[in-house]
Amino acid sequence: MKFISTLLGVSSLLLGTILAETDCSNGPWQKQPSSVGGSEGSDFCETKFKQGVIINGIEVWANKETVRAVQFKYSDNTLSKVYGEADGDKHSRLEWDAAATTVDKLTMWGNGKATRLGRIYLRLSDGKELDVGKDTDGQKSYEQDRGSGVMVGAFGKSGLDINMLGILFLGSKVKKVRVSEMKFDDDIQTLNSKKQGITAQVLDEATHTNKKTDSNDTFAFINEVSKRDSKKFSQSLAFTFGYHVDIEISGQVLGLGAKATAGYNWELQTTHTEETESSFERKLTWRTDTIVKPGKTIHCKAFANVGSFDGGYTSKVKVELEDARTFTFTEKGRLEAVSWSEAFSSCEDVPTPKREVLPRRVARGMIGQIGQ
C-alpha cells in the first residue's frame, strides 16, 4: 500500500516504516492514509479492526503550541493508552454512536515547525465537533481522506507531545455483513439429556358426558390456537458494521426437532436469514374423535411442547465493502429463541359426576293445601 504524507519534511518511506509489522500496516482503510507532524518520538499504532471493533471516541489535550496528548475510545467500551502527556489548558472529548454516526470532516495542522501536531478538528455527521490545538491562522491545513467515515484506527509518533498523527478509516461503505459458522457454548447433548428449556404446555381441555341411556355418541375434540416462534440474534460489533446495510445470517442454529421416541429434543437446523430478529405465527390444530358409551364421561386435553433457549455462541463475521475488499473476525453472540412443536390431543375416561339432587321447591299458593 502506498502512503502519502501531508506533513512537512516526512516522506512516504517514513510512514511505511512507522506502519510496518503492525496491525496498521495493512487493512481495509482509505487508499492513501496520511499524517501530519514531524519525525521524532516513538511509533504507535491503535486499531482493533481484526476483532471487529471500531473507534467511536477521541480525547485531545493541547496547549498554545502543540497537541500534547490523544486517547481513543473503542466500540467495545475499552480505551487506548494515552499517547503523549495529558496536560495543557486546551482539552476536549467527543464520543459518538458508531452504528448511526460517521466522521464527516477531519482537518489537521502542524505546529508551524514541522516537528509536532499543532491542531485537530473533527466534525461528525450529526454536527457535533471537536476542535483542539494552537492558533493556526495563516498556517496550511491538511484535509484528511475519510473514506467511509468509519474510524477504525490511528497511527503516529509520540513522546512528551504528539509528534505525528494519522487516522485510519474504512476505505468504502459496508455492502454486506455475513454471520456464519455459529458454534454454541451449550453442548446439544447436555441440553437434551436434561430436556433443558423444553416444557409441555396445555393448549385446551374439555369434559364431555354422554347423557343418553340407550346409545353411544361421538365427541369431537377439535380446535386451533396461534403461537409465535421467534429468533433474536445479538452481536453488537457485527451489527455496528451492519447498520443500514444488509446482514446475512447463515449456519446451524438450535431449534426444536421433530417428535422422537423419547419426546422432543433440540437439534441444529440450517438457517439462512437477513433479519437479526424474526418471528412468525404458527397455527396449532388438533382433533380427536372419541366414542362415548351411555352415561360415561371423558376428559380431553390438547398440548404442545415449547422450547425456550437463551445462550451464547461464537461466529465468523465477514464484512464486505463496496470496493470489493473484505475482512473477517470472530465474535461472540447470543441467540434468544422460542420454538413450538405441533399440537397433540387425547381423551380418557373419567368418573361421571353425580347429578346433584336439589330439594323440591313448594310452589307458591300451595301452602296449607298439602295433606288435605
Image: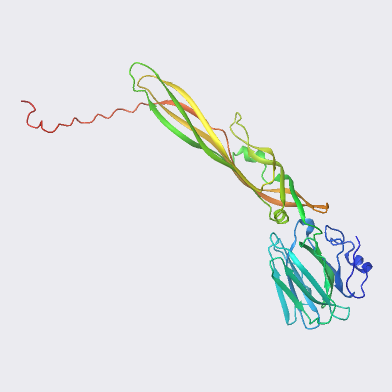
Residue situated in front as seen by the camera: 282 or 142: 142
Q: Residue furthest left?
A: 372
137 left or right of 305?
right
Q: Is residue 257 visible?
A: yes
Q: Position of residue 6 (x, y in %)?
A: 88, 71
Residue at 67%, 47% in the rendered image: 275
Image quarter in which the C terminus is found: top left
Q: Check the image and report above or below for 202 versus 53.
A: above
Residue 197 visible in this rendered orientation of the protein: no
Q: Position of residue 38 (x, y in %)?
A: 88, 75
Q: What is the quadrant of residue 258 in the picture?
A: top right
Q: How many labels were placed on the picture?
A: 0
Residue with the most extreme top position: 214
Q: Is residue 138 above or below residue 191?
A: below
In the image, residue 314 lies at what x, y percent? 72, 48
User: Foreground residue, 165 or 43?
Assistant: 165
Quarter of the rendering occupied by the N terminus: bottom right
Is the image coloured rainbow, by chain, by secondary structure, or in one colour? Answer: rainbow
**Residue at x-position 87% and y-position 63%:** 32
- In the shown orientation, is residue 337 left or right of residue 354? right
Quarter occupied by residue 43 = bottom right
Residue at the image point whose x is 72% and y is 43% from the top: 250
Residue depicted at 69% across the width and 52% down the height: 235
User: Taking 125 as reference, is 217 left or right?
Assistant: left
Q: Measured from the top left, where is residue 99 in percent x and y?
A: 69, 59
Whether 303 is drawn above or below 274: the answer is above
